[in-house]
Amino acid sequence: MRVLVTGAAGFIGSRVCATLTAAGHDVVGVDVMLAAAHGTSQPPDGVDALDVRDAVGVAAALEGVDVVCHQAAMVGAGVDASDAPAYGSHNDYGTTVLLAEMFAAGVQRLVLASSMVVYGQGRFACDEHGDVDPLPRTRQDLDAGVFEHRCPVGGEQLGWRLVGEDAPLRPRSLYAASKTAQEHYALAWAEATGGSVTALRYHNVYGPNMPRDTPYAGVAAIFRSVLERGGVPRVFEDGGQMRDFIHVDDIAAANAAAVEAELGGFAAFNVCSGQPVSILDVATALTRARDGSTPEVTGEYRSGDVRHIVADPARAAEVLGFRAAISPDDGLREFAFAPLRA
Ligand code: UD1
């Protein structure tokens, strides 16, 4: 198939292009080459400079395309409110231009890079009261080192459960708001045009050529960058925050599965390893692999951090036949020494 990959020069998009090409697809790669991600670099071989907000350029890139694999996005959580227009413009306005041009060109299939951040936080349950919507964590609890959410009925500390795709979407950051809106535009487009959208909700992605830590980086890039500077990762809270870390090659494999699945309508999938780990586990795996030292658990906390978010991989396995091949043990050991992008 001829596949247009947006964000093709990025950490994830470049692996998606490589995987699709290896699978025999004819890949057209475009990337806006945002200075925040690429500095002054020129697009790599096989990638054309294109902003998805440029309708004329997008129309030309769509010629003969069967599927669009939309990876281009401004990432991170947003540093402050001044980032909002950039998220809205690149992630949402850009997607609407792409969808309009796909309609005009008769391109009916979209694979959309979405994110676990659309859920806002994970699913929680109380031993006494079952599944509950947790109370927000109080400063008093956090200062006393009580990091778990409490039950809204009896105040008991809650445990985490796997999040399925039907969980409510409750974005809590600018980035999350833009990713949720992107899914909604895509869903509306699928309903109006009869097109198909496969939204892949990536969990915590890591792997070779991940960008170094920036104010927009997630924890894997921060830990890996600290180790490179000879420092020790600083683990917030008690390190018990649970996440699902997925290797970038598995993300690329999930995209290939979605491109090849030919589903109808709108469908969303968690893309995760299915092997939850704690943030302390991640820090320990990386430090151990490098020099055998131990990370520092600081007890500090950041307001707005999510305590646990752990995904259910079942739907992606059943419908797309996607199962992650790289365990966090193997992947993080490799990542401890993998190159990072400047
Ligand atoms: C992150 C991204 C989110 C992205 C998602 C999926 C940010 C801020 N969040 O969400 O945009 O879509 O992954 O890839 O970019 N922590 C430490 N030490 C540190 C930094 C963080 O212990 O130096 C802890 C935090 O307290 C938190 C956990 O690590 O509990 C994860 O932090 P982070 O990666 O920033 O956010 P996620 O919620 O996982």
Image: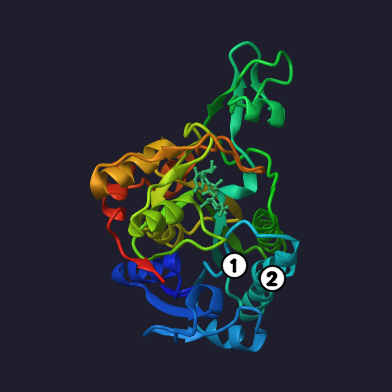
Do the CB atoms of the residues marked 1 and 2 lie less than 8 Å apart?
yes
Q: What residue is drawn where x is 37% and y is 52%? A: 231
- Relative to 264, 336 lies left or right: left
Assign a secondary structure to mark 1: loop
Query: Circle 2 is placed at which residue position?
Result: 86
Residue type at the position of mark 1: Met
Residue 280: percent from left, percent from top = 41, 37
Identify the coloring.
Answer: rainbow
- Relative to 84, 37 lies left or right: left
Query: Circle 1 is placed at which residue position?
Result: 74
Residue type at the position of mark 2: Ala
Residue 268: percent from left, percent from top = 57, 50
The one nearer the camera, 305 or 232, is 232
Q: What residue is drawn where x is 68% and y is 76%? A: 97
Assign a secondary structure to mark 2: helix
Residue 50 occupies quadrant = bottom right
Residue 80: percent from left, percent from top = 71, 60
Separation of residues labelled 1 and 2 (CA atoms): 8 Å
Q: Quadrant of the N terminus?
A: bottom left
